[in-house]
Image: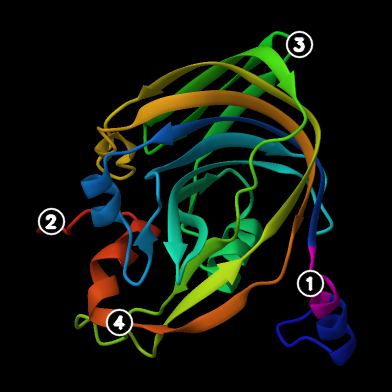
Amino acid sequence: MGFVKSDAELAAWYELRVRQFPDVKMLGLMFNLDEAQARRLLPEPLENADVPGGLLFIAEYGTTNLGPGYREAALFLRCAYQGVAGNYCLSMPIDSEPARLHNGRDIYGFPKKAATISCSFSEQGARGSVERCGVRFLELSVERAAPIDALPPAGPTYLFKAMPRADLTPGFDGPVLLVRQQTEVSPRRVHLGTPQLTITPSALDPWHELHTLEPVMGFVLESENRMLPGEVLGEVDAAAYLPHWFRMTDFPVAQEP
């Protein structure tokens, strides 16, 4: 395992095209959102969903075919592209080692950031929290109620891949690519439930910006997931996307030393 990989090492890496998550535990919340706010948060050419809103979750993944398990949270907005409904990932904290963080960012374009994530599951329900840079900005609990067979199908995730300019002028070194990626979820147990949500303001993780968020349904899920390879759909307007790219990183403007 050196700096330059052998042909055999490269072949083994590329054989893992499907990421396997055989033991997933998740608590989450589906919500509605004001139409104007959803429109402002969605980059072009993504369109508003028929019913604007989204999904947030905290998950614990057991051992995967990429190595040890880890925890993750995410904030998705419902959207559509050329009439095909799906979701746009607005934020994705993760508590894994850097390899997992960069796997999702570099390959697909998920906006992953290293975080401290806690979650626990019982027969009564589940609870979890997410903390970054000294701020516990998300706390969620769901009390189990009615069991159901499955959650509504989520459709594909729409993501953007771009590389900021090396000369630090506004824009990107190369095109901005719109990517579509699908994750298959095979549920083992699903319970709807009563959610309790607390979002604390954070300058670096502004989930509180979704001030029109209206909870619709909490859930607790146990499943097996398969993360399928993505597909580049085409190039998008780089200038229009630029204000959205900075969700990928923390954005404190440098101070004078």
Q: Secondary structure at mark 3?
A: loop
Q: Residues within 10 Å of mark 1 (few under 14, many from 20)?
A: few
Q: Secondary structure at mark 1?
A: loop
- Residue 120 higher or lower than 187, as above or below: above
Which mark sits nearer the N-terminus, 1 or 3?
A: 1
| Residue at 23% across, 79% down | 239
Q: Residues within 10 Å of mark 4 (few under 14, many from 20)?
A: few
- Residue 29 higher or lower than 73, as above or below: above
Q: Nearer the viewer, residue 162 or 144?
A: 144
**Viewport quadrant of the C terminus:** bottom left
Residue 17 shown in magenta:
yes
Residue 120 shown in magenta:
no
Camera-nearest label, 2 or 3: 3
In this image, 81 relative to 95: left or right? left
In this image, 198 relative to 240: left or right? right
Q: Magenta residues?
A: 13-18
- Image quadrant assignment for residue 175: bottom left
Dot 1 amino acid type: Arg
Residue 139 image point, x, y percent: 46, 23
Q: Which residue is mark 1?
A: 17
Q: Is residue 95 visible?
A: yes
Q: Which residue is mark 2?
A: 255
Q: Which residue is mark 4?
A: 237
